[in-house]
Image: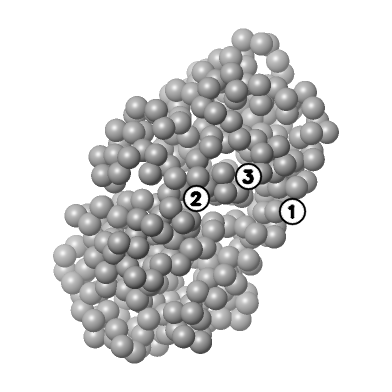
Amino acid sequence: MNILFVYSNKNDPCTRKCSFELSKGLKKIGENSSEIYYQELSEQMIMDNDIIIFQRLGANGIIISLKDDYRIFDLIDKYYDSKKFVYMIDDLVIEEQSGLPKKFLNKCHGAICFNEQMKQHISLYCKKVYVMRTFVDINLIKKVRSNDLEGFNISWISTGAIGKELILDIINEINSRELDIKFITMSGSSFLNGVENVKSYRYVPFTKMIYLLNGTQILLNPAPNNDKDFKERMEKRTKKTITECLNCKTELKYALAGATNNVIISSKTVPFLYAIKNKKNGLLVEDDVNEWVNAILKLYENEKFREKIIRYAYKDVNEHYSLKYASKKILEIFNEILGI
């Protein structure tokens, strides 16, 4: 099978995962897969491939010109009966660029998303929608050197700084107890700069993020639906409620936690309710600072409990969230689309 991933933003983490990593995974299981920048997509490339995947075009910060989207849509129309076209999207941003993602969904033979909630939204625009769960490249993660941080360390990752008020309350409450606990934070905001016991980073590359996670014991994933700043931004961007937006995200942070031997503590959004069996492969809590602090203290004080969760989560991620598993899953989807 010849597979072509068409991307628009090489610097976007979603593109790295859903184009380049998946393409690499497909090559490892014997498929002929390649990636191309959308402006370089040609008629010959379409003729040379069986399946063409448009990875989040129009929904990742790169403005697609009318000239380019008309050109791509003309190619889809011309080869619709002889090739298969798929739109892949991992977030509820289908209103971007005056609804350009919805136009791709209407034009393509099928769509791929990452949970059932997202499927419900995009099924309005595409008849055949397939779900594959998120994934991590465990072999790549294993190659990142370990980070021997001293003491007990907790990480928080959020490009959009979701739950920043809650995370600050958690940090302040932990600091007030004068414990040997430090925080490593990675987000698109600098609001934690200068906070006691916090080392704050902005927009770190993937390998550095893994390096930092290798030195922590807990990964926090607060996603409160009363986050005013995130609510305003996302509801304006998506024309959906904050709850709908949060429920359409992936459980990537669970996969990252499991692959780096962290215990995840998470809000009870749909993706994490799907992935986490409470107290078995992670902890699920309500969005109350006391619940978060109590969960942290339980893991901090009980190493046996912590290590048990880490072992189970690592096994689960290795079996169900690996690049190898995802590559086989997406190949099954491609075969179904092709009618093989």
Q: Is residue 103 left or right of residue 323?
A: left
Pick out the residue farthest to the right. Answer: 304
Of circles 1 and 3, the one toward us is 3
Q: How many marks?
A: 3
Dot 2 alpha-carbon crowd within 10 angstroms: few under 14, some 14 to 19, many 20 or more: many
In the rendered structure, which disc, 3 or 2, sits on the residue that comes first in sequence?
A: 2
Structural distance between the alpha carbons of marks 3 and 2: 12 Å
| 230 or 339: nearer the viewer | 339
Residue 42 found in image quarter: bottom left
Q: Residue at x 22, y 57 (%)?
A: 99
Q: Position of residue 36 (x, y in %)?
A: 39, 72
The residue where tag 2 is placed is 250
* Residue 64 drawn above or below residue 71: above
Residue 253 found in image quarter: top right
| 19 or 146: nearer the viewer | 19
Q: Is residue 148 left or right of residue 164?
A: right
The residue where tag 1 is placed is 315
Q: Residue at x 39, y 28 (%)?
A: 227
Dot 3 alpha-carbon crowd within 10 angstroms: few under 14, some 14 to 19, many 20 or more: many
Q: Amino acid at mark 2?
A: Thr
Q: Residue at x 65, y 35 (%)?
A: 283
Element assignment for label 2: loop
Q: Amino acid at mark 3?
A: Ile
Q: Is residue 202 left or right of residue 73?
A: right
| Residue 171 is at least partly visible in this image | no
Q: Amino acid at mark 1?
A: Lys
The residue where tag 3 is placed is 276
Residue 149 found in image quarter: top right
